[in-house]
Image (cartoon, rainbow, N blue to C red):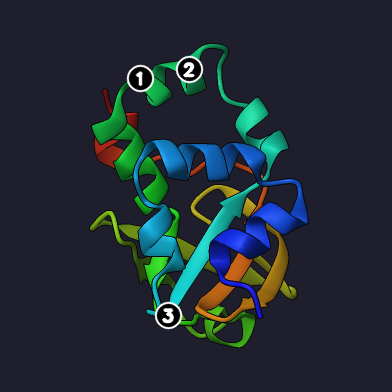
Amino acid sequence: MADLVETAINAGNFNTLVKAAQAANLIETLKSPGSFTLFAPTDEAFAKLPEGTLDALLQDIPKLQKIVAYHVASGDVRSDDLVQIDEAQTLEGSIVAIESADGKFKVNNANVLKTDILTDNGVIHVIDAVLMPAMVAGR
């Protein structure tokens, strides 16, 4: 089975996320044997950011690292687990809110489009928006 990074690359709709993870020097973390849950924004989700935001982030590596790490939680958290929790600790250090209703999930304000894409070092849940940690969004 492929790891998180290989799976994201092979899916073909996470190019911007992979590019951001590379720029933020987080590829090795996402390839490491630990167990991770990646809330993965699609390329369309990144396209919804205000114009110039992504380019600015790619120039601000510390901020970019915080944002990419905010999409990763420790452990293999599948949809069965998401139903039972209302928050998850991220690698960035802060918490994302998990909401489940009628078989659908939200992470903060992002809708989960697809759950449980299994990899050999965790699981990917596809989301329709880029998550911003409070300390970054507030600036």
Look at label 1 and name its amino acid: Gln
Q: Which mark is residue 8?
A: none
Q: Mark 1 and 2 residues: CB-CB less than 8 Å, in contact?
A: yes
Q: Which residue is mark 2?
A: 55
Residue 68 placement (x, y as % from top left): 41, 46
Residue 137 vertical placement versus 75 (above, below): above
Determine crowd level at label 2: few under 14, some 14-19, many 20+ residues with C-alpha closer than 10 A: few
Residue 19 vertical placement versus 108 (above, below): above
- Residue at image position (37%, 42%) is 67
Left-right relation of 33 to 138: right
Pick whichever of labels 1 and 3 is earlier in the sequence: 3
Residue 50 vertical placement versus 1 (above, below): above
Q: CA distance from mark 1 to mark 2?
A: 7 Å
Can see residue 133?
no
Left-right relation of 27 to 118: left
Q: Which residue is mark 1?
A: 59
- Residue at image position (43%, 63%) is 30
Q: CA distance from mark 1 to mark 3?
A: 29 Å
Q: Quadrant of residue 10?
A: bottom right
Look at label 2 and name its amino acid: Asp
Q: Which residue is mark 3?
A: 35
Q: Nearer the viewer, residue 20 or 136?
A: 20
For label 2, the SS is helix
